Amino acid sequence: MLRGRPWRVIRGWSPIPASNVPALSLSPSEKQRVVMDEGSKTQIVDVGAAILECKGPPMTDIILHHYDTSPYAEKVRTGLGLKGLAWASVELPQIMPKPNLTALTGGYRKTPVLQIGADIYCDSQLIMRELERRYPTPSFYPAGHGAADALAWWAEKTTFLPAVSIAFAKRPEVLPEGFLEDRVKFSGRNIDPIVMLAAVPNHLDQLRAHFAWLDQTLADGRPFLQGPAASLADLAAYHPAWYLRQNFGTAAPPLDGFPRLLTWAERIAAIGHGSRSQMSAQQALDVARDATSIARATVDPQDPIGRKPGQTVTVMPDDTGRDPVVGELVASDAHEVVIRRSDREIGEVCVHFPRAGFVVAPA
């Protein structure tokens, strides 16, 4: 059953999302009726006495800013599918400038970014954590926390860069104009196509080694990395393999040597992406402007630097896309840092970052 809140009540009755109606087991006496005008923005659901209406942009809480070919966005999209969620899609440019995203994040440029009202969640690591907090069933952690997070971190850190580097080197024709130049600024390194192509054999070697470990994990017949149910570890390990399959198919190395891993990837792909609707960037900005953040000032008594709410700090990734975001510290703990910032167009928002992999410094 798909979840989310894409409908508003117009007569004070409890809302039932339209996407849920086909899954409901209703007797004829309950008078299930669905009226949809496909050519307009108005849809009405009448289930018994509940009458709901949706006009204009999708009314789901979850807004994902992404583009379809992003591997990390695929991780989040599959997570939304695993939890059966309805969400609104805002298409991002693949290269800078990204003015609408900048209005929300204050300068953070990576893909994807999750928006729920006036709360902006950066990095897929934190996005998945927030989805789990808000929608705990089914869980990203069927075998418990800790190991799943560590496996996810390892899988992404070791396989993502080789996978995309191979694609960039061998299929430059599919990249948008200006892409490599943009990634020079993004990575802080010179990107030479000749050097990239020369590095492909080593990238294939590294992927083969790490894919072999994943393959061995599945050797006992388990359907997923941690057992009978898909976990965060599966979603994180899947998206680099997904990117290779998208660009080269399943017959190209190193995937061709791991039929068991390919079968596992097919299981992950079958999870799907939940219920996706389109939203414009301007509509997402309007949502942020009209909402209020849920973040509240919280002191972290174990903060190793002794940071306190109200201090002005900068936050940025420690690897690539090192564009500092400046704001007022609201809350932090071992997993998350939240800052408040104001934008001329949308007003006040709170931007959330993961602690792991990000640098927090005085402004």
Image (cartoon, rainbow, N blue to C red):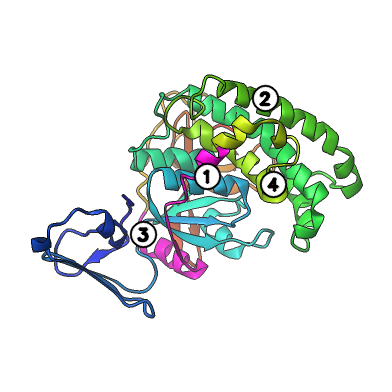
How far separated are the C-alphas under marks 2 and 4? 18 Å
Towards the viewer: 287 or 222: 222
Residue 212, disc: 2
Residue 278 is a magenta residue: yes
Residue 60, disc: 3
How far separated are the C-alphas under marks 4 and 3? 34 Å
Mark 1 falls on what kind of element? helix
Residue at numbered disc 4: 249
**Left or right: 338, with 294 as reference point:** right
Q: Is residue 282 visible?
A: yes
Q: Are marks 4 and 3 in contact (CB under 8 Å)?
A: no
Towards the viewer: 325 or 224: 224
The amino acid type, in three-letter code, at marker 2 is Ala
The amino acid type, in three-letter code, at marker 3 is Thr
**Left or right: 36, with 170 as reference point:** left
Residue 27 percent location from the top left of the image? 12, 57
